[in-house]
Amino acid sequence: MKHVYKYLLSALAVFGLALLIDQGICNKWVYHDYAAGMDRKLSCFWKP
């Protein structure tokens, strides 16, 4: 039964990390595109 808790906790940690990346990094990071001369938001490959 202890293995079930370990896998459940691991899955929860992976889900939390994915949510942190999705909400924190993909929505908030802005970088300067020197070729175009403008600021752009970082876009993640799983978002259209």
Image (cartoon, grey):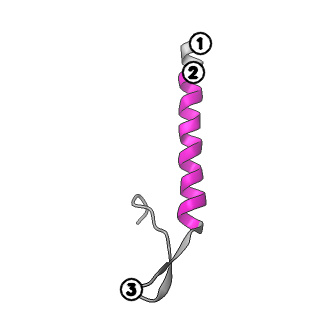
Q: Name the residue located 56 percent from the left edge and 26 percent from the top edge.
A: 8
Tell us which disc is closer to us: 3 or 2.
3
What predominant SS class does the magenta segment belong to?
helix
Tag 1, which secondary structure? helix
Q: In which quarter of the view is residue 28 placed?
A: bottom right
Please provide percent x and percent y for residue 46.
41, 58
**Front in this rendered view, residue 33 or 45:** 33
Tag 2, which secondary structure? helix
Residue kind at label 2, given as amino acid type: Lys
31 part of magenta stretch: no
Outermost residue toward the front in this view: 34
The image's mark for residue 21 is none
Which residue is labeled 2 in the image? Answer: 6
Which residue is labeled 1 in the image? Answer: 2
> Horizontally, is 13 left or right of 33 in the view?
right
Residues drawn in magenta: 6-27
Q: Name the residue located 53 percent from the left edge and 32 percent from the top edge.
A: 11
**Front in this rendered view, residue 9 or 34:** 34
The image's mark for residue 35 is 3
Q: Which corner quadrant holds the C terminus?
A: bottom left
Q: Which corner quadrant holds the N terminus?
A: top right
